[in-house]
Image: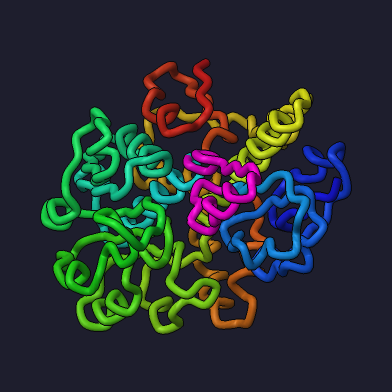
Amino acid sequence: MKLVVDENMPYVRELFADFGDIVAVNGRHLSAEQVRDADVLLVRSVTQVNQALLAQNTQLKFVGSATIGTDHIDQDYLASRNIPFASAPGCNATSVGEYVFNALLELAEKYGAELRHKTVGIVGAGNTGSAVARCLNAWGVKVMLCDPPLQRNGDSREFCSLDMLIEQADALTFHVPITHDGADATFHLLDAEKVSRLKADMWLINVSRGEVIDNHALLARQQSQPLPVVLDVWEGEPTPLAALVPLVDIATPHIAGYSLEGKALGTFMLYQRLCELLGRSVDKSLTDLLPTAWYQQLSLSEMPEQTALLRLCRFVYDLRDDDRQFRKIHQIPDGFDNMRKNHRHRREFSALALVNTDGSEVDCLTKLGFAGVVR
C-alpha cells in the first residue's frame, strides 16, 4: 500500500509505517501524477482534493484531511467514486482558542485595557469558537455568540446576529468555514459595508479563512481609521495583501492551530479512521507520541492579574515571535509556506503544571487549560 502524505503532518511515520510505503509531498503543489498510484492520501488545508487531482488515480481507498475545515475537499466527487473520507473535527480547537486568548491579552497590554472589562463577539460557535469561549469564560470575560446554523438547529446557547455583535461587542473573532452559497455564506461575511460600521475601538481577529473578511476593504479602513487587528489568515494565501500586513497589530501565517498537541491529534484521528476502515486494531497511543509535559511546576503564591497572566502565557507560547518573523518573510517567495513548514511546534497550556504553594484557588488557571497542582 502506498500512502501519499503532506510533509507537514507530524507523527505520520510513527502511526502509519505499518500500513505501507509513505511518500511525503509538498501539499501546496501536489499534482495528479504524484497521487496516480496512491492507495491513501493524507492532506492538510493547502491541498485541493478534487476531480483534477485524482483524475489519474483508479485505486484510492481513503482520503484524510488532518484539519477541522473541509472546504478544500470535493466530498461529492469522493462520494461519487465511493472513496471514504475523514477529517479531524476539533483536533486543533484548543490551540486556536489559546491563540485567540493570547492575542486578546496582547491587545489589552498594548492598548492599556482590561480584558475582563471587554465583551467579545465570537462568530462561529463550533469547536474552535467554543474553545475561545471557554478561555474567556475562565477569565471572567463576557462573550456573545453568533452562529445562525447552530441556532436554527436547536443549540441551547444564546445567540445574537452579526449586526448585534458589531453594535454591542468590543471585539470580534471569526471561527467559521468558508462557504459561497446560501443564506449563511461566509465569503466576505465582513464585507466593505460592515467593515465601515466597525467602531473605532473595535478589536478584530480572524483565525478562520482569509476570505471571510474583505481584505481590500479592511486595508482601506486601516489606512483611514485603523482598528486593533489580529490576522492569522489572509485572502490570497500564500500571498497576503502586502500593504495590509504592516497595518495590523499581530500577523501570522495561518498557524493558530499549529500546537504540537493539535497537529498530532489531527494525524492520530486519521490513523484511527483508517484502522477502522481496514479492520485493524488501534495499537498506538497519542500519549506515547507526545513529548513529556513541562512539569517544572512553576510556583504561584497568588492568582495572577492580567499582566502576570500574559507573562505566563508567553512562557508557553510567545505570539510576538511568530509576528516578528512573519513581518520579515511575508513578501519573500514561498516565505509564507516555509514558515508554516518550519514552524517550531508550540505547546498548549496543558503542557505546563502550576504549583500553588499556599493552597489558594487555582480554578481559573486550570479552566484555562494549565495543569494545576496544589501543595
On the rendered structure, is 142 left or right of 365? left
In which quarter of the view is residue 73 placed? bottom right
- Is 91 inside the magenta-drawn segment? yes
Asked whether 277 falls inside the magenta stretch, the response is: no
Which residue is found at the position 50% from the left and 18% from the top?
Answer: 374
Q: Magenta residues? A: 67-93
Residue located at (42% from left, 66% from top): 210
Instruction: Single out the residue that lies furthest toward the front.
Output: 80
> In this orientation, which residue lies closer to the viewer: 106 or 205?
205
Q: Residue at x 67, y 37 (%)?
A: 268
Place of residue 110 in the rendered image (x, y in percent of width and height, measured from the top left): 33, 61
Would residue 293 be found to the left or right of residue 207 on screen? right
Q: Is residue 214 left or right of residue 166?
A: right
Front-most of residues 190 and 75: 75
The percent position of residue 278, horizontal first and vertical second, equals 76, 31
Whether residue 260 is visible: no
Instruction: Count up the numbered dots.
Output: 0
Q: How far across and down, in percent of the image, does residue 59 sit?
A: 78, 51
In the rendered image, the quadrant that contains the N terminus is top right
Asked if 5 appears above or below 190 in the picture, the reply is: above
Placement of 13 over or under 331, stated as above or below: above
Query: Dividing the picture into quarters, in which one does residue 179 lie?
Result: bottom left
In this rendering, the answer to whether 375 lies above or below 336 is above
